[in-house]
Image (cartoon, rainbow, N blue to C red):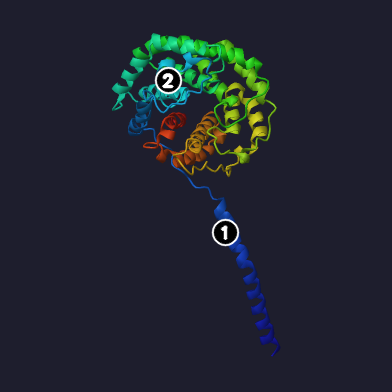
Amino acid sequence: MRFPFLFLAAILFFNSCELKTKPEDAKDKTVQKQQEIKTFEAPEFSLAEANKLLELPLHCVETEYPNKLSQTIGSDADLQSPEALHPLFYGCFDWHSAAHGYWSMVTLLKEHSNLDKGAAAMTILDRNITKENVAKEIVYFEGKLNKSYERTYGWAWLLKLQEALKTWDHPKAREWETTLQPLADLIVERYIEFLPKLVYPIRVGEHTNTAFGLTFAYDYAQVAGHTELQLLIEQRAKDFYMKDAGCPITWEPSGYDFLSPCLEELDIMRRVLPRPEFKKWVNDFMPALKSKKFKLPVGEVSDRTDGKLVHLDGLNFSRAWVLYGLANQYPEYNHLKNIAHEHIAYSYPNLVGDSYEGGHWLGSFAIYALIQNQ
């Protein structure tokens, strides 16, 4: 009877061990499943997509109302219609959105010469980018109460528009570039005057973000060969951000963000630092980016009819363009493109046909993200 008893005890022991290990095995499989990274397809910037995206600026650049003038009133004389005050950039709800609406049209025409409504876009550009309209825009900026008007977000988009014209090989682009240059020169002067006075960078996720304002202005300075502006931005970016480390990306986003404070800072430093310096800097600034398992959840939008909440779609696009830019310049970060794909996949399907709350500006963000992935 001794051996059967031992045999039965052994069976009970092994069954007990099996019962104890099964829950752990299941837990390990759950953890493994949670760690799996879903693959997202790269977005296409096809002619069909360009045609859909063109509808957004076509709809808004000459739509005067609703309008947010964001002006300081000095007298009754300032109480004029948007078109009277800003004969070029009066549409798309506000001045800066009108500026990047024009940038959208120029960029789409550059990328695709056979757009269905390309002729309509060319007509609008020709009708509105005139010496008279630019002169009136300059008069507004030179008003004693308007020294900080659109600083620096609108400034950045105006220079981005001028950069797009300068890099477009088309006879009309040369004409419009020449016409717009006096306003671009004024904006450059404003940057050169303002940046030395800025003691601390503005680290928010909306219009006044310093890193974003520096980035687009830097691109313009390089294309235009404006050495003074380029060197000033390089110095100021280093002053503001060189000692930064451990950026708390997990704190983002705030409820109304359309820019990532961490990633916008990375975007300007990627431009101004030599490769060895940047590699060291980014490893201190956001070391987690190197990991193939790095995750960055998309910004979720609960109500796309709310003009502030829909900002988070813009955040998804701006995050994407920063990640594409980093991966394109530094192949060791190529895995981040999948995160960029995911961000675009979340927000892009809701873009075309969206309410006016997002349609007047989000197209520009989508276009800029898409061209960074080409």
Who's the residue at 52% across and 22% down the image? Answer: 216
Identify the secondary structure beneath mark 2.
helix
Q: Quadrant of residue 270?
A: top right
Report the mark closest to the observer, 2 or 1: 2
Q: Position of residue 349 (x, y in %)?
A: 40, 40
Question: Label 1 belongs to which residue?
Answer: 29
> Could you tell me the amino acid type at mark 1?
Lys
The earlier-in-sequence mark between 2 and 1 is 1
How packed mark 1 is, by other alpha carbons closer than 10 Å (few <14, some 14-19, many 20 or more), is few
* Circle 2 Cα neighbour tier, 10 Å, few/some/many (<14 / 14–19 / ≥20): many
**Image: 329 above or below 248:** above
Cα–Cα gap, marks 2 and 1: 60 Å
What residue is at 66 percent from the left and 29 percent from the top? 281
**Front one among 79 and 117:** 79
Residue at image coords 49%, 44%: 302
Left/right placement of residue 350 relative to residue 29 reads: left
